[in-house]
Amino acid sequence: MFSTTPLKYLAIFLLAFFIFSCDSTEPQKRERISFNNHWLFEKTQDTLAYQMDYDDSNWRRLSVPHDWAIEGPFKPEYNSRTGGLPVFGMAWYRKYFTIDPSKKGSIITLEFDGIMSNATIYVNGKKVYHRHNGYIGFEIDITPFINFNKKNCIAVLVDPKPLSARWYSGAGIYRNVWMEIKNPIHIAHWGSRISTPIVTEDMAKVEVKTKLSNKDLNKGPYKLKTTLYDNNNKQVAEDIIKLGIDEPVVEVSQTMEIENPKLWHFERPNLYKAVSILYKNDNAIDNTEVTFGVRTIKYTREGFFLNGKKEKIHGVCLHNDLGPLGAAVNYRATERQLQIMKKMGVNAIRTSHNPTSPEQLELCDKLGLLVQGEAFDVWKLPKTKNDYHTDWDAWHRQDLKDMIRRDYNHPSIIMWSIGNEIKEQKEPYGADIAKELVAICHDEDPTRPTTAGFNQLSAAIKNGLAAAVDLVGANYKPTQYSGVMKQHPTWIVYGSETASAVSSRGVYQLPLQKYDKDPSLQVNSYDIIAPPWAYPPDIEFHFQDALPQVIGNFMWTGFDYLGEPTPYGGKDNETTGSWNTDWPARSSYFGAVDLSGFPKDRFYLYQSQWTTEPMVHLLPHWNWENSGIKTVPVYCYTNADSAELFLNGKSLGKKVKGVDTTRIPVSFHAWGNRPKYFDSPYRLSWNVPYTPGELKVVAYRNDSIVATESVRTAKARNKIRLIPDRNVIKADGQDLSFITVKIEDKDSNFCPLADNKVTFKVTGPGTIEAVGNGNATSTEPFQANYRKAFNGLCLLVVKSKKDFPGDITIEAMSEGLVSSTIQIKTKS
Ligand code: GAL
């Protein structure tokens, strides 16, 4: 048989000869390569799986980002507090790779954006790194462990403990992994810090500080050229600096000016790019590219100002998971989540309660969303058995610094939170820890204020903790904003976490009654139910409206998330930590949007308060036949002046916002001695004797119709409709199409109670990535080719195949219903 091997060796020899004889062994350019593919995975307790020659021949092949826990199955013993999913236990990832010998002399690093959690990394059988915190990324220099031109093996032990958080954290190498090959003298990891100390209409002063890492202690001469480009890739400034690098790490500063800068703000989030190239003797030896924005932020007692304009923060708290996709980061899924939030009128995200993915921040920069970057949910004192308190002493400084160093350049970030509801609010030493953390933040980043979320505000004021941060965040204390501001004449106050109302999409329980657990384990969607520390959104709206100087609020939460199924589940049982008293309730009811991304009614309540583009929304559904319900309360959420309701064409009267109110029950802790209800000016309502047909609402501004919405009584379920969010996606093996699956009657009316099981068949260059339906009690797997509808809807997520452009065909079938077929194009 003819062998190509000798020829191959000859080619390698000639190439090496050429390279060496050119005296140019140094890389001309940094290589940044995705290290996501060709991993092997096994859930094994075997502690020897780090060994080079370990037998992994039967291990599962996969790509990361990967979250093993989302694969299930759901089990009560996995604890509904963390989603009823296996977010703990030992597992190993292994990957073989080779590095071309021509790269000898280069620095080889691996960058993990995050491993959940308690990860130990081995290269060729040697332990090279350990990191407990799953939310922060890190870089490892693996150069000393590499075998050039031989097979190398990386093994990653991931060993998350049960109850390492109060929510579902996911498990595994759940964020991206990168390999970099670079010159021994290079721009350090997270080594560029860009700030804009002066911004006027005519000019922005841009300061670029660059850390250079010198692994050779080679003196140079060197030159660093940094060029700034606008969003059309037009060069707008450049600076070249000559330097000697005679220390292991050297920081250089370059100052440039951009004329007539295009500012970053909500509607036009303009971004700039700084390209830095490092030269040795006029040869380029390293390069990086960093995105930044030009904008100013200012906090005063009058409010928050972005580029000099006062803006109220209309924020949401978001947990880390992506619903049916679990915690594994996916760019499109993250983008979709943020786009849905923007539609609701959201202008800010709080990354509760941990550093988020780099992708989410990149998208917030692109979409014009402000961000509160949060470091911790726990300090020294625990909230759950194995949470961050076990790491606190050894890691908190490093973890906090790393979050700021990683995220410094994002224009979207406007404040750093050093903690959420930390137990030390009540401890005499709480203020000391806060001061230490605040000092770290100020040292790392003098451009942004610090904050924390206090649920025990009085205690945190008493022990000095609240005074230690720059912005005082109150969790669930709208009644105290005004008093606290009066008593502390310099403090700037806002709602770091608000409302925590609960509901299940499409669930309407009549007659209306205040909070009571329901045997269905669902929660009424009339937006009147909240746990005892929490309250309906209207209360927050009221205090925010009354106090324009309060800089805004972050409602809990934008999306439902896995775990913490309040009001079901229970208090942590001391010994087992179990929350399973109401199994299978396994995910949150707090979202304005359900776990699959379908808006609940509450989405529209916020939209009516946070947007100006005319909108109107009506609830409940109009299928009350056979229910025994004679009169139905009908709620309308609108940002128009007034709305008129029609039943089968007959007017039931016009209601005027600000004049007509809706009485809702309110009885949260901090409501005190006030009446146990609130006459909400934020919703219009009618009591409507039930007759099937069409219920229609017409919204007016200045007597002109600006928006309408109708709900019709659906007849028998007849067919499936498939509605993709995008018909064309990228053939990159990552991009997703989110397909809404809707059950309709024969006249195409939505069937609001349908629970049919739908089966999917996907053919062509795509695969099923996940299914879901927003039902917080479903134990059906998220990775399957079927899903039951929940109140008329379910979701199918389809992923493209890499490098196979073409048409994906998606068929949806259900017994007794007319099937549906659509096509999605994938493009290179
Ligand atoms: C807060 C907490 C959040 C979430 C929320 C539910 O106290 O900060 O993480 O648990 O309650 O209402």
Image (tube, rainbow, N blue to C red):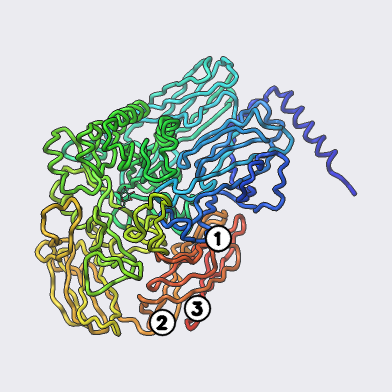
User: In the displayed structure, would residue 625 be above or below residue 807?
Assistant: below
Residue 368 locus on image (x, y percent)? 34, 46
Q: Are marks 3 and 2 in contact (CB under 8 Å)?
A: no
Q: In which quarter of the image is the C terminus?
A: bottom right
Asked if disc 3 is less than 8 Å from ligand 1, the answer is no
Q: Is residue 78 above or below residue 548?
A: below
Look at label 1 and name its amino acid: Thr
Q: Nearer the viewer, residue 797 or 806?
A: 797
Examine the rendering and report whether any part of residue 615 can be seen.
no
Q: What residue type is labelled 3?
A: Ser
Q: Which mark is residue 814?
A: 3
Q: Is mark 3 on a helix, strand or loop?
A: loop
Q: Is residue 654 left or right of residue 268?
A: left
Numbered circle sitting on residue 717: 2
Q: Are there few (<14), some (14-19), or many (20+) residues within 10 Å of tag 2?
A: many
Question: In the figure, residue 700 lies in which quadrant?
Answer: bottom left
The image position of residue 717, as x and y in percent, is 41, 82
Q: Distance between the residues labelled 2 and 1?
A: 32 Å
Position above or below: 506 against 339: below
Which residue in the structure is indicated by mark 1? 826
Question: In terms of sequence position, does the residue under pointer 1 or pointer 3 come before the other?
Answer: 3
Task: Residue at 52% x, 56% y: name it.
Answer: 735
- The answer to whether residue 41 is visible is yes
Query: Residue 186, located in which quarter of the rendered image?
Result: top right
Residue type highlighted by circle 2: Arg
Q: Quick one: label 3, few (<14), some, or many (20+) residues within 10 Å?
A: many
**Front tag of 2 and 1:** 2
Name the residue located 67 percent from the left edge and 25 percent from the top edge: 25
Which disc, if any, is residue 644?
none
First along the sequence among labels 2 and 1: 2
